[in-house]
Every structure is written in C-alpha cells, then in structure tokens.
Image (spheres, helix red, strand yellow):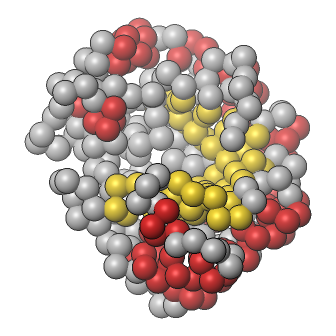
Amino acid sequence: MAKKSNKPYKKAYLEITNVCNLSCSFCPKTKRSPRFVSVEEFSRLLCQVQPFTDYVYLHLMGEPLLHPELGELLSLCDSHHLKVSLTTNGTLIAKQQALLLSSPAMYRVSISLHSFEANCTGQTLEDYLADILHFCRVASQQTGIYCVLRLWNKDSALLKAQNQRNVDIFAQVRTFFELDFDPAQALEQKPSVQIYPRVYLETAEKFAWPDPERDDPANSVFCHGLRDQFGVLVDGTVVPCCLDAEGVINLGNIYAQPLAEILSSPRARALYDGFSRRVPSEELCRRCGYAQRYSIL
C-alpha cells in the first residue's frame, strides 16, 4: 500500500497514549504511568521524526482514539507531510469517524477485531461490528483511507487463541459487503483478502509478546526493529520496535537528545548488526515470540 520513500525508515511507531479502554486477554498491558502526549510534545517529536520516515503509526500500547486532542495531532502530522496509520480496538470508531475521515493525513486504519472476544464489554458482536463495517464502507466510498480488519487470533503450534466468534464475524462481514465468496475459505489460502475497495480482512497466528521472564529464549532471531522501524513511547523513550511495551531496550529519550544520535548510538548499532547475523544483542529480543517468526533455526 505504502509508496516507496528515500528516507531511512519505512515507519515510526509513535505512542500518543498508553491508556486503553479495554483489557484484552492477549495484551501484556503496561506498568508505566498512564499518560497522553501533549500537543507541544508531539510537535517537537514530529520535527525530529520527519527526516527519518514518511509514515507514522500512532500506537504502541494504548488506544489512540482515546486521545482528547487527536484532531490536533492529526493536523500536525499533515503539516509535517506525514501519513498516519493507527491501530484501534474499534470500540470508539463511530465516535471518531468524522474526525478520521476528514483528516488528510490519515492513510490506514487497522481494527483489531480479535479484541472483542478477548474482553467482556457487554456490547453485542453485531453492534460492535456494525459500527466498524459502516466506517470501512464510508471510508472506502469517500476517502482514500485503507482499512484493515484484523483477526490475529489463529491457533499456533504453541498457543491456543480465543477465536470461537470468528465464524460469526466472517458471516457478518460477508453479509454486510455482499461478498460472492466465503472469506473464511479465502483466508485459508492467504493471510489477507480484499473485501471492498481499499478494505481488507486479514488473519494471523497469536504470538507471544517479548517477556524478560520467558524461559525459552531463542538463539537465532531476526527482526525488522531498527531496520525499517523504530518506536517512541509516550514519555519520549525511543525503542527499536512496536512490541517493547515497557521500554526495556531504552535507546534514549527524544526530548533529551537528537533522534539521529539515539539511532546511531552503540547500543542501537549493536542491535542492528546482531540481527544481521541472527544473533540478537538484547536478551528481550531472544524472548520475543513475534521476532521468532523470522528466525533461522
């Protein structure tokens, strides 16, 4: 989807809040103090990020649609010529629909449908999906925004996921978009299928988040962290990827030193070089179930 860029990174994950309105069973949560980035902080942040990428993803932990000044943050991204992608649990999509659809900076909205079954919200699946599917159809018809409906809850060889409602989700999606094919069957052949112009449904296996206490570290690990992405937590801590929820691999703080200096630091270079050899320099990376997908065993 994304256009090629001459900048060194494909994307930067910018956490605008670590606060969430759900408590998903698959999410590791965060022990960090709850926080929302301020407009002034975000402006400073974008000035540093802009030379490194054309695409910013407004999430690591937290629910980005909760941010009370989301409109101003999106306007800042547009003024810095940055395209925005965000991942949401979808519960606030109707409330924020007008804002998202009117923002010229919005590029993609990914909605984690698997969050419904992983919570007890009291809302019916039908009502939850109705708002989301309506948003996707309007976005397709009125804007150039891409929408990705995620079901990252397939069982893996090691992990059992919550996916009993997937059959109901597939049925409602098929009916709503009047599909002449079975999306469940299509997804058995490939991980993503188009169900409407610029609207995709995708599946993936459940994975284990990086955990310093995990007792089965891998010796051979490859990751795209610091190769095509980096992240910035809500307090300015720079991390190598979107899964370092606690800032264990703290490369520096973007509000205290230049981003270029942080990304070229000895610790950052060691991490990059280690992944090139499939020998991670950080213990956390050896204990990341997602990174092990790229491992050479």
| Residue 16 visible (yes or no) | no
Q: For the view shown, which residue lies furthest in the front direction?
A: 180
Which residue, as the protein is rendered here, is positioned at the far left? 215
Q: Residue at x 17, y 43 (%)?
A: 213
**Which quadrant does the N terminus fall into?**
top right
In the image, residue 193 sits, relative to residue 230, either above or below, namely below
Residue 138 position within the rendered picture, expressed as x and y whole percent measured from the top left: 81, 70
Q: Quadrant of the C terminus?
A: top left
Q: How many numbered dots are placed on residues in this image?
A: 0
Quadrant assignment, res 83: top right
Residue at left 35%, top 55%?
205
Q: Quadrant of residue 77?
A: top right
Q: Nearer the viewer, residue 5 or 65?
A: 5
Residue 115 as seen in the image, left or right of residue 229? left
Q: Nearer the viewer, residue 49 or 127?
A: 127
Q: Is 158 above or below relative to 177?
A: above
Left or right, 9 with respect to 151, comes to: right
271 shown above or below 32: above
Image x and y of residue 141, in percent: 85, 65
Residue 218 percent location from the top left of the image? 18, 31
Residue 1 appears left or right of 274? right
Locate residue 208, reporting x and y percent.
Answer: 28, 50
Residue 263 versus residue 138: which sits nearer the camera?
138
Does the image show residue 147?
A: yes
| Residue at left offset 57%, top offset 82% | 172
